[in-house]
Amino acid sequence: MGSFSIWHWLIVLLVVVLVFGTKKLRSVGSDLGGAVKGFKDGMKGEDEASKKTDSKTIEGEVKEK
């Protein structure tokens, strides 16, 4: 935990809870969790999309008119 002891972190946590309140912190936590889940789903979808496009590669030549 670096140079801070557990008591320093508990005091910081208490101050944060007193300043922002538990409802606001819960809201921020759920928003952050939803964003992380959306990011993971997006990355999973991108991987699946790249696998699908790799199997449909068409080779050819480009000729000028």
Image (cartoon, rainbow, N blue to C red):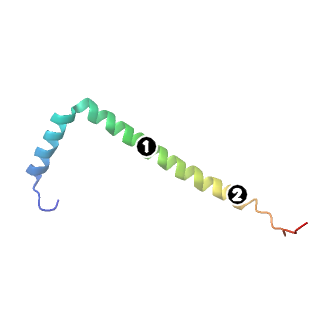
Identify the image quadrant of residue 23: top left
Q: Position of residue 55 (x, y in %)?
A: 73, 60
| x 42%, y 46%: residue | 36
Q: Earlier in the sequence, mark 2 or mark 1?
A: 1
Q: Position of residue 50 (x, y in %)?
A: 64, 57
Find numbered disc 1 in the image and state the secondary structure of the residue it sits on: helix
Give the residue at mark 2: 53
Q: Nearer the viewer, residue 18 or 43?
A: 18
| Type of the residue with mark 1 | Ala
Identify the image quadrant of residue 12: top left
Q: Position of residue 9 (x, y in %)?
A: 14, 49
Which mark, by number, is residue 35? Answer: 1
Find numbered disc 2 in the image and state the secondary structure of the residue it sits on: helix
Q: Nearer the viewer, residue 65 or 49?
A: 65
Q: Position of residue 58 (x, y in %)?
A: 80, 63
In the displayed structure, does residue 31 sit left or right of residue 54? left
In the displayed structure, does residue 63 sit left or right of residue 40? right
| Type of the residue with mark 2 | Thr
Check the image and report above or below for 17 versus 8. above
Q: CA distance from mark 2 to mark 1?
A: 27 Å
Check the image and report above or below for 46 versus 62. above
For the view shown, which residue lies furthest in the top direction? 23
Q: Residues within 10 Å of mark 1 (few under 14, many from 20)?
A: few
| x 11%, y 52%: residue | 6
